[in-house]
Amino acid sequence: MILRHVTLDCAHPYELATFWSKVTGWPVSAEDEPGDNEVLVEAPAPLPGLLFIGVPEGKTVKNRIHFDLQPTERTRDEELPRLLALGATVHEDHRKPNGRGWVTLQDPEGNEFCLEMSPAEV
């Protein structure tokens, strides 16, 4: 058994997939285009891809599952402005005066995800 995709319901699959493509650096599938109701962000093997499916209802409560991201080429605090420029917003800031902690963000459709410290900072 392998985990093939992590699937996210959303209002605008191509737009949200494009956001996550820029966040992760993984490509949107060449088979997908604006207006498609299912759009795949292709992850490098063996990681699961991110599949965005259009649904009519909006997000109403806190996510039951979310991503914890750890930057590899920048520190957490260097990565934060890049994510904000891509369209993320800060939901809760859990950084501590000693440099530890994380930032909880929301993607353009309000899905929460966390930005943790890079391996070099741990």
Image (tube, rainbow, N blue to C red):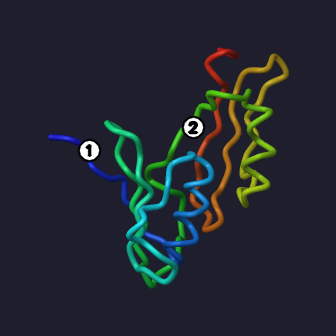
Q: Residue furthest right?
A: 97
Q: Amino acid at mark 2?
A: Leu
Residue displayed at 70% across by 27% down: 101
| Cα distance between the residues tagged 2 and 1 | 18 Å
Locate residue 12 relative to residue 110 in the image: left or right: left
x then y, percent, for residue 81: 81, 45
In the picture provided, is 105 more to the left or to the right than 2?
Answer: right
Q: What's the mark number on residue 62?
A: none
Specify the label residue 69 is tagged with. Answer: 2
Residue drawn at x 65%, y 14% is 122
Q: Residue at x 76, y 46 (%)?
A: 82
In the rendered image, residue 36, in percent from the top left (x then y), is placed at 43, 80
Residue 34 image offset from top left, x and y in percent: 52, 79
Decide if residue 68 is on the left or right side of residue 8. Answer: right
Residue, far left:
1
Question: Does residue 109 sit above or below 57 in this rendering?
Answer: above
- Image marks 2 and 1: residues in contact by CB distance under 8 Å: no
Front in this rendered view, residue 60 or 83: 83
The residue to which callout 1 is attached is 3
Residue toward you, 27 or 49: 27
**Circle 2 sits in a helix, a strand or a loop, which is it?**
strand
Earlier residue among tags 2 and 1: 1
Answer above or below: position of 37 versus 80.
below
Query: Which element type, helix, strand or loop, lies under badge 1?
Result: loop
Q: Residues within 10 Å of mark 1 (few under 14, many from 20)?
A: few
